[in-house]
Image (cartoon, rainbow, N blue to C red):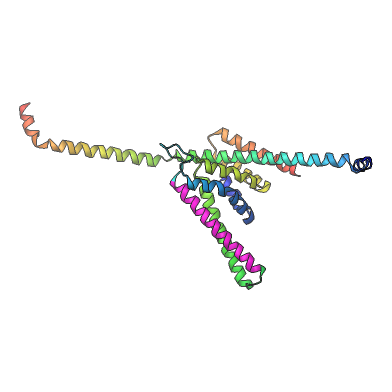
């Protein structure tokens, strides 16, 4: 499992809103001028990146309006409990779908400057619990595969040590 | 003014201030560690992605096969053009 996936999967809806709101400016810039980050001869932005970004924006707006509507109706007590539960389920489904598309974008375009920035922005939302869990799993997987690159394994060990250190300092 | 200053000095507690500084220092350290570890994990993901991309050997073999077949077809077409002269050329030699 990639790091972006493990972080986004554990993200609360409010954190995801905040994250996507911050990313909104760069996303609109990218959609307005898709060649801005690229060399004209060899465009860096793949067409699937643009499609994914468009999907993300659409899903995000849809989820935001639906969620706000549900909260407003709940505040006014205009919904019965069963309807509210149904709406909550729908919000959850939409959230899962949005997360999947976002993960797809972050895990499939490592050369794009814009996606790189999105990946870096994600660091602000990393929790210690997610980090230590991911570090443990990653080390276990790398050891299981008998990774040919010792450099990668040592990097993973270093990251694991940092996570343990952070956990100690937090206490 | 002096009264104000003495009041503020009375309320100043060196022990609590140093404790606050320590807490801030530890918080910053935790943040830094998290950021560094996260950056490393992103780097590992990128490495694995690039490594998997270069692993598409089956695709490369298929492409090579297509290229060879294309060349063979062109060669056959070219040789077919001169088939009717085959006998006559043989006679001259």
Farthest-out residue, top: B93
Q: Position of residue B13 (x, y in %)?
A: 89, 41
Q: Quadrant of residue A136?
A: top right
In the rendered image, the vertical position of residue B87 relative to residue A119, given as above or below: above
Compared with A113, A51 (above or below) is below
**Residue A62 included in the magenta stretch of the image:** yes
Q: Between residues A43 and A104, which one lies in front from this camera angle?
A: A43
Residue B89 visible in the shown view: yes
Q: Look at 94% across and 42% down and name the residue there.
A: B3
Q: Which residue is found at the position 64% from the left and 65% from the top?
A: A71
| Rendered image quadrant of residue B56 | top left
Looking at the image, the residue that sits furthest to the front is B1
User: Is B14 on the left-hand or right-hand side of A118?
Assistant: right
| Quarter residue B85 falls in | top left
Q: Main secondary structure of the magenta part?
A: helix
- Give percent across and percent down for residue B23: 78, 42
Residue A115, percent from left and from top: 53, 44
| Residue A75 in the image, given as x and y percentages of width and height | 67, 68
Residue B45 falls within the magenta-colored stretch: no
Is A47 on the left-hand or right-hand side of A60? left
| Rendered position, B43 above or below B92 | below
Residue stretch rendered in magenta on the structure: A47-74
Quadrant in which the C terminus of chain A appears: top right
């Amino acid at each position: 499992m990639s790091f972006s996936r493990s972080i986004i999967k554990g993200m609360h809806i409010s954190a995801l809103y905040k994250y996507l709101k911050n990313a909104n400016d760069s996303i609109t810039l990218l959609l307005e001028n898709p060649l801005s980050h690229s060399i004209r001869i060899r465009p860096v932005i793949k067409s699937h990146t643009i499609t994914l970004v468009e999907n993300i924006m659409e899903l995000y707006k849809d989820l935001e309006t639906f969620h706000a509507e549900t909260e407003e109706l709940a505040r006014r007590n205009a919904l019965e409990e069963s309807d509210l539960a149904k709406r909550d389920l729908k919000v959850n489904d939409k959230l899962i779908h949005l997360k999947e598309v976002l993960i797809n974008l972050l895990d499939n375009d490592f050369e794009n400057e814009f996606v790189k920035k999105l990946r870096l922005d994600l660091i602000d939302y990393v929790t210690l619990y997610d980090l230590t869990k991911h570090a443990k799993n990653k080390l276990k997987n790398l050891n299981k595969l008998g990774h040919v690159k010792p450099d990668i394994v040592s990097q993973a060990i270093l990251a694991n040590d940092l996570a343990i250190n952070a956990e100690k300092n937090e206490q | 003014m002096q009264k104000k200053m003495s009041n503020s000095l009375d309320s100043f507690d060196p022990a609590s201030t140093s404790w606050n500084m320590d807490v801030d220092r530890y918080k910053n350290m935790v943040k830094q560690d998290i950021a560094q570890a996260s950056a490393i994990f992103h780097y590992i993901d990128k490495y694995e992605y690039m490594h998997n991309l270069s692993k598409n050997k089956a695709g490369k073999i298929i492409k090579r096969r297509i290229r060879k077949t294309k060349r063979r077809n062109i060669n056959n077409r070219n040789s077919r053009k001169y088939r009717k002269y085959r006998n006559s050329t043989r006679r001259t030699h």
